[in-house]
Image (cartoon, rainbow, N blue to C red):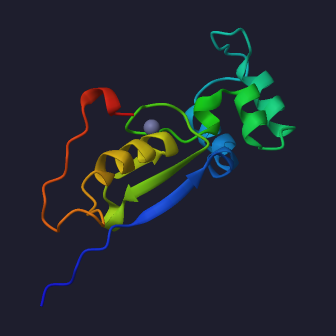
Amino acid sequence: MRQRHVPAFRILTDVEVSASAIERWREQYSHWTPERRFSDGKSKGEVDAALDACSRTPSEISRILNAGWANPRCDLCEERATVVAQVGGEYGGNTVSCCVTCAERVCLLLGQFLPRAADPVGKPPRPLPAGELP
Ligand SMILES: [Zn+2]
């Protein structure tokens, strides 16, 4: 008998992403000298010093680096978010991250297929007109 596949879901927050930001940033710029400057004029050494004194909160990481280092990214709308649900990743596979706004849109779209108490079972759902889509 074949076992039913249960997808893996995981919540990823900006706090968790920010907690690992400094290590990820230092790894990415490990080949830079401390004097080398970023496009905003700050040197790698200056950023490094600011990170040493940082509390690793999302707001601190965003201020010193940018929101891209502090917040998870939604794979559907490609925006940075405070929290996303990650789906997949079993056996080393890829994950898909979904923000609350996109999850709400998916629920609204799928919700039209839920059987309603007054509807006979099996009645095809009424598709939402394009103007009603979130
Ligand atoms: Zn999204």
Q: In this rendering, would 60 be left or right of 121?
A: right
Question: Outermost residue, front direction?
Answer: 118
Horizontal and vertical percent position of residue 103: 43, 47
Residue closest to the eye, 43 or 18: 18
Horizontal and vertical percent position of residue 44: 71, 23
Residue 43: quarter of image = top right
Whether residue 132 is visible here, answered yes or no, is: yes
Q: In this rendering, would 72 be left or right of 42?
A: left
Residue 118: quarter of image = bottom left
Q: Disc count in the image? A: 0
For the point 24% across and 32% down, which residue is it? 129
Q: In this rendering, would 88 be left or right of 79?
A: left
Image quarter in which the N terminus is found:
bottom left
Q: Quadrant of ligand 1?
A: top left
For the point 83% across and 43% down, which residue is it? 55
Question: Outermost residue, right direction?
Answer: 53
Q: Is residue 123 above or below residue 41?
A: below
Residue closest to the eye, 89 or 35: 89
Whether residue 30 is visible here, answered yes or no, is: no
For the point 82% across and 30% down, which residue is it? 50
Q: Is residue 122 above or below residue 102?
A: below
Residue closest to the eye, 36 or 55: 55
Image quarter in which the C terminus is found:
top left
For the point 24% across and 55% down, which residue is it? 113
Horizontal and vertical percent position of residue 18: 67, 44
